[in-house]
Amino acid sequence: MKHLIIYTHLNPNSFTKAVVNEVEKISNDIGHETKIIDLYGDKFNPVLEFSDIEYSFMDGEAPTDVKHYQDKITWAEHITFVYPLWWGQMPAMLKGFIDRVFAHGYAYTYDENGPKGLLNDKSVQLIINTGNPNKTLSESGLQASMEKIIDDGVFGFCGMESKVTFFGNISLSTDEERKQHLDSVKNLVV
C-alpha cells in the first residue's frame, strides 16, 4: 500500500512527532511504501492567496507548491494525519493545507446534484493529540463535533472514508501512558 503521513507540529521532539515515527515504523514493517509530509519542516505557506482562488474557480494553474502536495496525495492510497488539538481545532497550518491543497476541481466538484468528492479511492486515519482527557472531550460534546466536521465536512466531502483516534491528556500524561498510546498505534495502521 502507498501510505502518506501528513503531520504538523513545530517541535521536532513533540509527542506528535513520536506518533509519526511510530506510524512510519509500523507502516514500513508491514511492507507499505511510506512517505511523510512535515508541514513545518517544509515551511508550507498555509495562507490562501488569490492565485489559489484563480486555480480552484477561474481555470488557473495550480500554484507550484499546491501541485507538489496534490501529486503526493494522488500517489497515496491511505493517508494518516497526525496533529495536536489547538483551541478545539486542527492547527492553522493544517487547516491552510486543506484549504489550499484539497481544492475545487482536485478534491471535490459540484454538479447538478450538489458536491461530489473526487478522492474516493483513498482512506484516511487521523490521530489527534489533545491536552484534555478523552472523557472530558466526549462529555462536553466536543469530540463528537470534531468527528462530524472531520468525517462529513472535510474528508467525506472529498469522498474519503475517515477514522479518528484521540490520544487524550497528553500534556499531563505519564511516560507510561504515552507509551501505551504509542503501543496502540499498531492497531491504527492499515
Image (cartoon, rainbow, N blue to C red):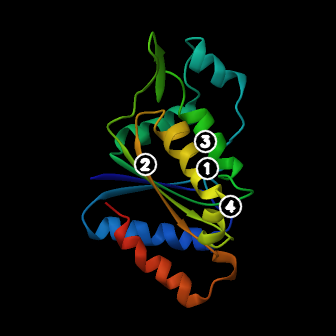
Q: How many callouts does the rendering have?
A: 4
Quadrant of image for the C terminus: bottom left
Which residue occupies 44% across, 72% down? 22
Disc 3, disc 1: CB below 8 Å?
A: no
The disc labelled 3 sits on which kind of residue?
A: Phe
Camera-near label (3 vs 2) is 2
Quarter of the image for residue 73 reads top left
Secondary structure under the numbered disc 2 in the rendered image: strand
Answer with left or right where residue 98 lies relative to residue 160: right
Q: Please name the residue that numbered disc 4 is placed on.
A: 140
Query: Along the polypeptide, which appears first: circle 3 or circle 1?
Result: 3
Q: Residue furthest front?
A: 139
Secondary structure under the numbered disc 4 in the rendered image: helix
Label 2 CA crowd tier, 10 Å (few <14, some 14–19, many 20+): many
Q: CA distance from mark 1 to mark 4?
A: 10 Å
The disc labelled 4 sits on which kind of residue?
A: Ser
Q: CA distance from mark 3 to mark 2?
A: 17 Å
Which residue occupies 55% across, 19% down? 61
Camera-near label (2 vs 4) is 4
Q: Please name the residue that numbered disc 2 is placed on.
A: 162
Query: Along the polypeptide, which appears first: circle 3 or circle 2?
Result: 3
Disc number at residue 87? none
Camera-near label (1 vs 4) is 4
Disc 4, disc 3: CB below 8 Å?
A: no
Label 3 CA crowd tier, 10 Å (few <14, some 14–19, many 20+): some
Q: Please name the residue that numbered disc 3 is placed on.
A: 97
The disc labelled 2 sits on which kind of residue?
A: Ser
User: Can you give x and y, in whole percent of width and height, for residue 74 in the image?
Assistant: 38, 37
Q: Please name the residue that numbered disc 1 is placed on.
A: 145
